[in-house]
Image: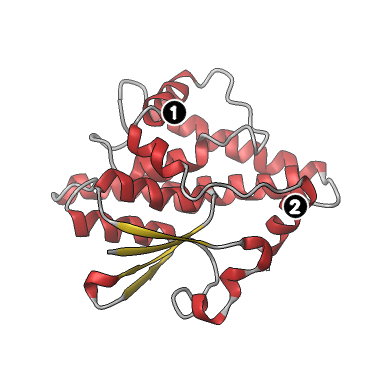
Amino acid sequence: MIDLYTAATPNGWKVSIALEELGLPYTVHALDLMTNEQKRPEFLAINPNGRIPAIVDRDNGDFPVFESGAILLYLAEKAGALLPADPKGRSIVLQWLMFQMGGVGPMMGQANVFFRYAPEKLPWAIERYQREGRRLLQVLDQHLVGREYLAGDYSIADIANWSWTHTHAWSGIDVTGLDHLAAWHERIGERPAVQRGKAIPAPAQRSAEELAKAARTLLV
């Protein structure tokens, strides 16, 4: 049994979607980011960085894993799925996973902060992160020409990237003309396990002011 500590964010969706796709049994522990539950000592014992998501594998000596990319790798290896066994195929998946971890997530995350939440609107910052976010989505769009998935078969690379990129409108990133990306978004989004995973946990009903405050807490 896996204990999943999460919230309704792109990084959280990566893990709940993967768990649904892999068919691994798990229990959800939804953390309220508004009240800084992720900073409490009992959670810091699982993830010293105080961020969601994190898991504890009760079948493996209560083994904790934090960082969403590391969790995806751990779960794929545990289940023997969503990650090729051969070195070349595995490397391709990991390259696109790291593309999301090092580029898509940070750039879109910063676009969210400056476009949606910052108390002072800084046009140069908004434009910088939206422009770089658009560039990264263009990379994905071009790579998807003639491909159904990012790395051959459907994999954790698709889960990681989709969890962020399908939220492009929230970041204020225009995807006009990125038709291959749009088709991939639709293809992934139609998967039943993706739909189930994205609904976990149910998002709390918050005001715009509360959401802005919650976003700012993620920066400290």
Between circles 1 and 2, the one closer to the viewer is 2
Residue 151 percent location from the top left of the image: 28, 37
Residue at the image point whose x is 21% and y is 58% from the top: 77
- Disc 1, SS: helix
Q: Is residue 152 left or right of residue 98?
A: left
Compute the Cα span from label 1 to label 2: 27 Å
Residue 66 percent location from the top left of the image: 42, 67
Image vertical order of residue 36 relative to residue 103, above or below: below
Residue 130 percent location from the top left of the image: 66, 38
State the quadrant of the N terminus: bottom left
Can residue 219 be seen in this snapshot? no
Residue topped by disc 2 = 212
Pick the front one: 192 or 139: 192
What amino acid does circle 1 point to? His
Residue 2 percent location from the top left of the image: 31, 63
Q: Is residue 171 left or right of residue 11?
A: right
Q: Which mark is residue 185?
A: 1
Can residue 72 be seen in this snapshot? yes
State the quadrant of the C terminus: bottom right
Determine contact: label 1, label 2, CB under 8 Å: no
Question: Which quadrant of the view contains residue 189?
Answer: top left
What amino acid does circle 2 point to? Ala
Question: Which quadrant of the view contains residue 75?
Answer: bottom left
Residue at the image point whose x is 82% and y is 46% from the top: 122
Residue at the image point whose x is 46% and y is 42% from the top: 198
